[in-house]
Amino acid sequence: MYEKLEEVNEIVKKCTKCGLCKTRTNTVFGTGNENAEIMFIGEGPGADEDREGEPFVGKAGKLMDQAFLGLGIDRSKVYIANIVKCRPPSNRTPLKEEAMACLDYLRNQVMIIKPKVIVLLGNTALKNILGDEYGITASRGKWIEKKGIKYLPTFHPAALLRDESKKIYFWEDLKLVKQEIEKE
């Protein structure tokens, strides 16, 4: 267990635990407020993220930013990370062994940040954090509490780009997150 995100990030930058290290331009550790009440966890970096070294800066990230703006969620006050810290080739879904290689880094991020709510963006984040018995379509929009943390699965913003009918569900789910934080 590390005490600072920078310590974990330095280890991630040198990581060679899986084959994704061979094709990355940059590791994509995470970004945001170290004291965030809300943490978002996605699948893995895409091409834009790999180039810039920051999560959710491409089209899906821009869509998420629009939702944040519309709901009054300040991106600088949340923390955003991914299951894997390196881009899978051709933006494919990370393999189980790739996800497993990165999960300790993510666990450290969660333990350092101590968020009240974790929003799981998509099926890959959901299954790797809560287990294979969960599926995004059945679980989205439903609170799941484990080990004192409240999780809310929702669609990944990239899925909204492929199917605009899912945008309303994403919006409703983020409203639930905002309501949960404002209850305190």
Image: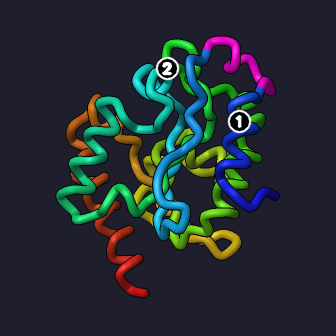
Left or right: 52 with respect to 93?
left
Q: Earlier in the sequence, mark 1 or mark 2?
A: 1
From the top left corner, tell me how far across and down residue 37 is, in percent: 48, 70
Q: Residue at x 69, y 31 (%)?
A: 13
Report, in whole angstroms, how far the alpha carbon at label 1 lies from the one at label 2: 19 Å
Specify the quadrant of the image occupied by residue 182.
Answer: bottom left
**Residue lying at the far bottom of the rendered structure:** 184
Q: Residue at x 53, y 68 (%)?
A: 35
The foreground one among 14 and 151 is: 14
**Disc 2 designates what residue?**
91
**Disc 1 designates what residue?**
12
Vertical comparison of 105 with 181: above or below: above
Is 27 colored magenta in this rendering?
Answer: no
Specify the quadrant of the image occupied by residue 115.
Answer: bottom right
Q: What amino acid is found at the position of numbered circle 2 in the picture? A: Asn
Q: How crowded is mark 2: few (under 14 residues within 10 Å), some or many (20 or more)?
A: few
Which segment did they paint magenta?
A: 16-23
Q: Which residue is drawn at 56% across and 39% down?
A: 124
**Residue lying at the far left of the rendered structure:** 70
Vertical comparison of 48 with 117: above or below: above
